[in-house]
Image: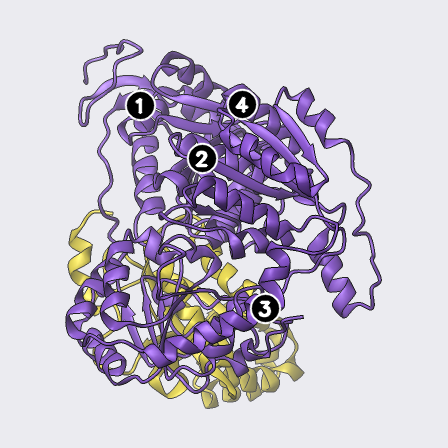
């Protein structure tokens, strides 16, 4: 018989100390053991025991009350990506759980570590269509790295230990643990040990040095090598190794949208962004390089365009942590499996110092063309109407590129990602893979809480803002210092652009008759301003950036502006259009 | 690339929902699973899935990597038809009186290397192990006698090479789950 003693409520339990507590108290103790001090969630019937337990730990765990569970997940994503920690979400059963799904799917496709804990109806009612019952394990299975249903309190420590380990290890991702209400109430002998391995799971494949040798040989013999890098560099904390590698080899390097900020924008070897609305040079010259070196990226179709016209002339080297990404979209000649921090440290020893001046110059020539045809006009428009690009240009001037950029999805996202300057890593938070409108506002608030010492600018369009606009209340309640920039073109701009270019200007359901966003922001007690004229813009942005606290700035921009360059869907990357 | 018959094998933990997690990988790509068999394996506490599909090798290779990526999957691999020894099991239920009206049924059963699993007063059950086409060949011959029930199991298969893909997992079974 184990000793039965009730721990004082504020005591943090140490590993392996058996205490008799409830499942709900165990959940909170485990969060503390895992170093969690901030969580996002929304209470409800089936998760009430955990919320009751949280009440005793308010000094140690700050619970952010989102206004919708989807908001909680995106806020947790923003928090995770700004801080490098695991984001934690709490929700109740049924609708609470189903509202998590979009955030889980977003985190899954963008490899963001999340631990979501949902309440579930009592185990005796499982499968009976009980009030607020939903099969969240079944529903979340395709959009989680791992999930598990707990029906007995004793399972909680093991399940949550695994959850944190799986979420953060290897290629990170979201996990979900569903806990029945009776398991939350049940008392048991609690002890906790962090998980350090799961016998069926290899988070990081062991680096095979022979692959490094083969990669080095290709790189050393390359005449026109080209690096395409993604978020793997950031997730692997390999920014320094990456920079050393490119500087030694002198290889022009382009980032994917998820790789933004892994290298400073102004680095001489940074040749810009890949993808549908990326830069001209990296898209065009993908089809002229002789060795393509992909690092921590997954050849998303928005990056490759038509695969049958993608880099067919090149030998492909792929540095990747997830074996399932090898040959998934682009056939690889040399796959270097492993954590890119280690792979790059090994690879850098085997490559010869080089510079590829003539080749690099090709990118710079392309930049000149793009600058003349697109960029100048976007950043310094001659038209009366404000452009999104000039707003971003002024923000760069005010922040010196030190801000965290959070974006929603659409034209503003492409413009902001194209023109924002980055000087440090973990500064770009966007919904890259899933393209989730409504991501920006909650992710911005999460980022502000995850990186309280940094300026966080959330750039959002008028469509996406209205998908999670309720999170203004969360911003007000938490006093998160997020600067919300609305680029308002009174259209679902990206869809409208496609309608203009590919659907004969038939603007089907893309014009927005909007509410007065100023009144809305005021209603949430957020300081606000609106700009329609160019002469007010600079001062307004200065006030926006300098304000100590949350701020809402609305800028009215040209209604029918388009984002260029563009690789039309179905085209090859070299068929990139400048106008 | 031509579609052909493949057998996918996966060694896994015994985990509620893992079957669903694996089938989702096929559903996502709209691949039809011809049969799916879950069973014990040669190792204590390690389970084994045997999945039969007809697809291109390129797609099967991708699917297998995505199966192996699942946290509770130890190892997955795919095999072409000549690379495995495979069997399916068929059961046929027919009226007992068909046996008393001549020797045809007994002869057919013998010729097909099938056997009577049970002979009851009202019905008999015939069992046939073999390839799918053999099971259907017997079905066709028994059809005129009236088949009351017929069922065919999923494919089970072992690799023709000396070592199983689970070989490297043996040490793992020492580690608690």
The quadrant holding residue A212 is: bottom left
Q: Residue at x 58, y 51 (%)?
A: A413
Q: What secondary structure is found at the residue carrying circle 4?
A: loop
Q: On the same chain: label 2 and label 1?
A: yes
Name the residue that disc number 2 marks. Answer: A455
Secondary structure of residue under mark 1: helix
Residue A2 shows in this picture: yes
Question: Which chain: yellow?
Answer: B
Q: Secondary structure at mark 2?
A: loop
A239 and B142: which is toward the camera = A239
Is the residue at mark 3 from the same chain as the one at mark 1? Answer: yes
Neighbour tally class for label 1: few under 14, some 14-19, many 20 plus, Cα within 10 Å: many
Q: Which mark is residue A372?
A: 3
Quadrant in which the N terminus of chain A is drawn: top left
Closer to the N terminus: mark 2 or mark 4?
A: 4
- The earlier-in-sequence mark between 2 and 1 is 1
Which of disc 1 and disc 4 is earlier in sequence?
1
Q: Tell me the distance, in whole angstroms, between the alpha carbons under discs 2 and 3.
A: 31 Å
Label 2 vs label 4: CA separation?
Answer: 30 Å
Q: Which mark is residue A43?
A: 4
């Amino acid at each position: 018989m184990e000793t039965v003693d009730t721990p004082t409520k504020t005591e943090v339990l140490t590993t392996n100390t058996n205490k008799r507590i409830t499942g709900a108290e165990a959940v909170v103790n485990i969060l503390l053991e895992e170093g969690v001090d901030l969580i996002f969630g929304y209470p409800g019937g089936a998760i009430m025991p955990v919320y009751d337990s949280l009440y005793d730990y308010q000094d140690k765990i700050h619970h952010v009350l989102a206004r919708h569970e989807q908001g909680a997940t995106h806020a947790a994503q923003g928090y995770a990506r700004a801080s490098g920690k695991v984001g934690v979400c709490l929700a109740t059963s049924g609708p609470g759980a189903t509202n998590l799904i979009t955030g889980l799917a977003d985190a899954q496709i963008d490899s963001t570590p999340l631990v979501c804990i949902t309440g579930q109806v009592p185990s005796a009612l499982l499968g009976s269509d009980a009030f607020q019952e939903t099969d969240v394990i079944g529903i979340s299975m395709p959009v989680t790295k791992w999930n598990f249903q707990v029906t007995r309190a004793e399972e909680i420590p093991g399940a949550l230990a695994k959850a944190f380990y799986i979420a953060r290890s290897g290629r990170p991702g979201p996990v979900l643990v569903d806990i029945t209400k009776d398991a939350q109430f049940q008392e048991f002998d609690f002890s906790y040990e962090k998980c350090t391995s799961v016998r069926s799971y290899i988070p990081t494949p062991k680096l095979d040095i022979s692959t490094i040798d083969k990669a080095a040989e290709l790189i050393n013999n390359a005449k026109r090598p080209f690096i395409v890098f993604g978020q793997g560099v950031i997730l692997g904390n390999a920014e320094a190794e990456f920079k050393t590698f490119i500087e030694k080899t002198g290889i022009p390097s382009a980032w994917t949208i998820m790789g933004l900020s892994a290298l400073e924008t102004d680095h001489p070897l940074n040749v810009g962004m890949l993808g549908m609305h990326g830069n001209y040079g990296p898209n065009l010259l993908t089809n002229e390089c002789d060795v393509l070196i992909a690092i921590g990226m997954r050849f998303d179709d928005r990056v490759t365009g038509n695969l049958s016209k993608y880099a067919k002339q090149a030998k492909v080297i792929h540095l990747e942590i997830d074996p399932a990404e090898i040959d998934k979209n682009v056939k690889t000649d040399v796959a270097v499996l492993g954590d890119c921090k280690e792979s790059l440290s090994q690879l850098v020893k085997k490559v010869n110092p080089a510079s590829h001046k003539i080749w690099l110059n090709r990118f710079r020539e392309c930049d000149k063309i793009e600058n003349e045809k697109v960029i100048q006009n976007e950043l310094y428009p001659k038209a009366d109407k404000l452009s999104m690009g000039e707003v971003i240009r002024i923000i760069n001037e005010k922040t010196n590129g030190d801000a965290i950029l959070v974006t929603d999805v659409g034209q503003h996202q492409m413009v902001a990602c194209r023109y924002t300057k980055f000087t440090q890593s973990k500064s770009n938070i966007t919904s890259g893979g899933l393209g989730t409108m409504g991501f920006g506002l909650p992710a911005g608030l999460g980022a502000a809480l995850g990186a309280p010492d940094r300026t966080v600018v959330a750039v959002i369009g008028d469509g996406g803002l209205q998908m999670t606009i309720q999170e203004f209340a969360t911003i007000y309640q938490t006093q998160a210092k997020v600067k919300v920039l609305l680029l308002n073109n009174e259209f679902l701009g990206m869809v409208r652009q496609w309608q203009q270019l590919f659907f004969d200007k038939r603007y089907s359901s893309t014009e927005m008759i909007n509410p007065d966003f100023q009144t809305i922001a005021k209603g949430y007690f957020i300081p606000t301003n609106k700009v329609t004229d160019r002469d007010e813009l600079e001062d307004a942005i200065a006030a926006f950036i300098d304000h100590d606290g949350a701020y809402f700035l609305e800028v009215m921009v040209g209604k029918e502006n388009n984002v260029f360059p563009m690789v039309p869907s179905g085209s090859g990357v070299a068929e990139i259009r400048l106008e | 690339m031509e579609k052909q018959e493949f057998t996918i094998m996966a060694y896994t933990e015994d985990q509620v929902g893992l079957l669903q997690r694996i089938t989702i990988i096929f559903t996502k790509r709209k691949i039809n699973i011809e049969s799916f068999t879950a069973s014990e394996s040669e190792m204590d506490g390690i389970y084994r899935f045997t999945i039969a599909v007809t697809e291109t090798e390129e797609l099967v290779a991708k699917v297998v990597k995505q199966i192996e990526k699942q946290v509770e999957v130890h190892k997955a691999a795919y095999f072409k038809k000549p690379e495995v020894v495979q069997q399916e099991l068929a059961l046929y239920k027919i009226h007992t009186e068909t046996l008393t009206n001549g020797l045809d049924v007994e002869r057919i059963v013998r010729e097909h290397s099938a056997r009577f699993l049970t002979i009851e007063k009202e019905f008999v059950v015939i069992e046939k192990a073999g390839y799918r086409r053999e099971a259907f060949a017997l079905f066709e011959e028994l059809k005129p006698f009236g088949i009351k029930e017929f069922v065919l199991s999923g494919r089970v298969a072992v690799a023709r090479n000396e070592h199983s893909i689970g070989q490297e997992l043996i040490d793992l079974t020492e580690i608690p789950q």
